Amino acid sequence: MLVDEILNKAREEKRTVLTEIEAKQILGEAGINCTDTRLATTKDEAVAISEKIGYPVVLKISSADITHKSDAGGVMVNLKAKAAVEKAYDDIMASCTAKYPSANIEGVAVQGMAKAGTEVIIGMTKDPSFGPVLMFGLGGIFVEVLKDVAFRIVPLEKNDASEMINEIKGNKLLEGYRGQDPADIPFLEGMLLKLSALVDKTEGIAEIDMNPVFAHKQGAVVVDARIILEAA
Ligand code: ADP
Ligand code: MG
């Protein structure tokens, strides 16, 4: 199975960090909607993939050694044509190799530009006494500054998912705000339940971070994902 293959490969390589591409493959297998994200190992390949996916696209550094990709100059969004993709490829490589000279860089991840939406984050961490716990919150300052997040122990019941979304203080923002569309709450609940099922049946995952997820009027999509494995 794909999930086991990815986990085994990482363990063989003595890695505990999965790349965004690997993380999205695992989440995708669990039925969680992620942007279609593919690896390019050359500039020409990045252009070919961009043309297949359709502009605008996003390019990101793909390296298990670089987990905060934007900080490393490793993310370029809204690329609208071939020339922009070529320049982004060079700029990302230059910036990341300068900042992380010893990082093992496998290439650049190419994905479609997701339609803007309400940004939420969904995560999993392991609590020493409760075991795996899911987290839900709004993106940006809501999590970082206000710590406005809700937690539930895995496995989640259907009620848990709706309660989590209801209990965050910024919950009103999901109903639509200043002309922004409301978020598809049932779809977000589905994401939480699918993540719970994945975590419940998969051993060896220490941490999952889907940040951000763009919630739309219909549906939602994970645009960045990180998975950390337990040390062997
Ligand atoms: P980091 O490793 O720094 O967290 P991200 O993959 O989250 O990198 O990218 C940084 C930001 O770029 C995101 O918070 C989001 O706003 C934007 N972004 C990333 N991927 C996409 C995408 N596919 N479509 C639209 N915006 C994106
Ligand atoms: Mg991110």
Image (cartoon, rainbow, N blue to C red):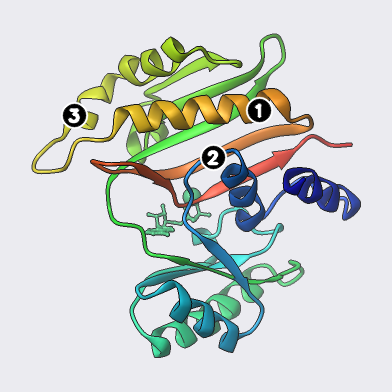
Dot 1 or dot 2, earlier in sequence: 2
Q: Nearer the viewer, residue 117 or 184?
A: 184
Name the amino acid, label 1. Val
Residue 9 x %, y %: 84, 53
Query: Measuring 24% from the left and 31% from the top, which residue is drawn there?
Result: 174
Residue 98 x %, y %: 63, 75
Identify the disc placed on residue 175.
3
Identify the disc placed on residue 31.
2
Q: Is mark 1 within 8 Å of ligand 2?
A: no
Q: CA distance from mark 2 to mark 3?
A: 25 Å
Q: Which residue lies most toward the left here?
A: 179
Dot 3 or dot 1, earlier in sequence: 3
Q: Is mark 2 within 8 Å of ligand 1?
A: no
Name the amino acid, label 2. Gly
Q: Nearer the viewer, mark 2 or mark 3?
A: 2
Dot 2 or dot 3, earlier in sequence: 2
Identify the disc placed on residue 47.
none
User: Compared with residue 63, is residue 51 higher up or lower down, i.e. above or below?
Assistant: below
The answer to whether residue 79 is left or right of residue 133 is left
